[in-house]
Image (tube, helix red, strand yellow):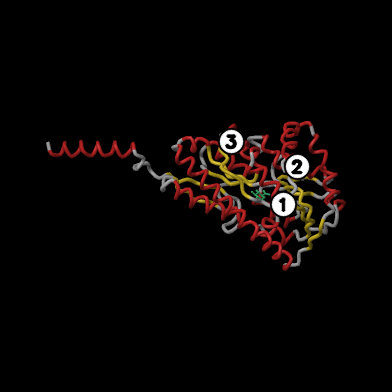
Amino acid sequence: MKKIGLLLLMVVIVISLSGSNMLAAAKICKLAEVHPDGYPTAEGDKKFAELAEKYTNGRVKIQCFFNSQLGTENDVVEQTKLGVIEFTRVSIAPVVSVYPEIGVFSLPYLFNSHEHQWKVLNGPIGQHFLSAVEKANLVGLGYFEAGARHFYARKPLNSLADLKGLKIRVQPSPIPVAMVKLLGATPTPIAYGEVYSALQTGVVDGAENNYPSWVTANHYEVAKYLIEDGHMRQPEILVVSKKFFDSLSKADQEALRRAMREATAFQIDAWNKYESKMLEQAKAKGCVIKKANIAEFQAAVAPIFDLPEHKIYKPWVERIRATK
Ligand code: BDP
């Protein structure tokens, strides 16, 4: 009889605790990242993970996997869509294959400065895309800074003419492919983790990226000629699987959004310091950096806005350009 009484008491305690969230098991989640630990996006991921755990009182624990350990960006976007991976931090480019509209942020010379870009990302347009990506079973939690991208090659690049006929590695995504074609080069889509060996073995003559990627992925060792043309300011995005997000309480969902808002501010700061450090490192290594005639590059890529397949971007481009 005593035993039954004790059992009943335990049942009552368990039922009341489960209603109050106290027994909710901590969920150990994965976050995919292609960069190494220490790179600004990786620092942003870690900050996000730390704050997410804190603000959900330990109910969401996130383990970050760096260096493409969980797969290429295109693969991890698919896995996150399916809910196999809970979180992923990628460039906008791989998201375009599951949600084409967001490709507007990949268009060349769309943003004219860091300030303009963040005004758009923090305003109604940026916020629209974070929620609209739900169409691909993803929830956008926020953006990270990725600076501007430039071309670099194994041969000297002094002007646009030097890009003609070169095989240039691009992100496996339609807009970079179209852009490189318009510049007279041959686009070669390759996953980020394989770019170094493609450059080293001469599978490609060059690539394009921001200073931190050029340096940390060691591209600068084998492709030391860079032309600073700043063709793209493509933001990074942190997405969560909608399946996982929907399983959380409203309070925990808000805790994740709050964690990301704070991680973004932290990451932008880390980025600014790191970008100039990487530029100095490249110069010290003897890399050759030329300033491009930007007007020449802008004129060459201008038709990208009128391609029939890019019609969907027109209204967004107008709104983005009008954002002051
Ligand atoms: C880097 C982005 C990374 C992209 C990579 C690339 O941070 O997310 O995958 O470029 O070019 O700048 O693939």
- Residue on which disc 1 sits: 148
Q: What type is the residue that disc 2 sits on? A: Val
- Horizontal side, residue 91 vs residue 302: left or right: left
Which label was assigned to residue 200?
A: none
Task: Give 166 or 227, whichever is nearer the viewer.
Answer: 227
Q: Is residue 152 above or below residue 186?
A: below
**How far is disc 2 from disc 1 in space, using C-alphas?**
17 Å
Q: Residues within 10 Å of mark 1 (few under 14, many from 20)?
A: many
Task: Give 246 or 256, whichever is nearer the viewer.
Answer: 256
Q: In x, y percent, where is residue 43?
A: 56, 55
Examine the image and state in which quarter residue 80 appears: top right
Which label was assigned to residue 131?
A: 3
Q: What type is the residue that disc 1 sits on? A: Ala
Please give the name of the residue rendered at 64% of the width and 60% of the height, measured from the top-left corner: 274
Given the current orientation, which residue lies at the most extreme front position? 324
Q: What type is the residue that disc 3 sits on? A: Ser
- Residue on which disc 2 sits: 177
Please give the name of the residue rendered at 20% of the width and 36% of the height, measured from the top-left corner: 8
- Horizontal side, residue 81 vs residue 8: left or right: right
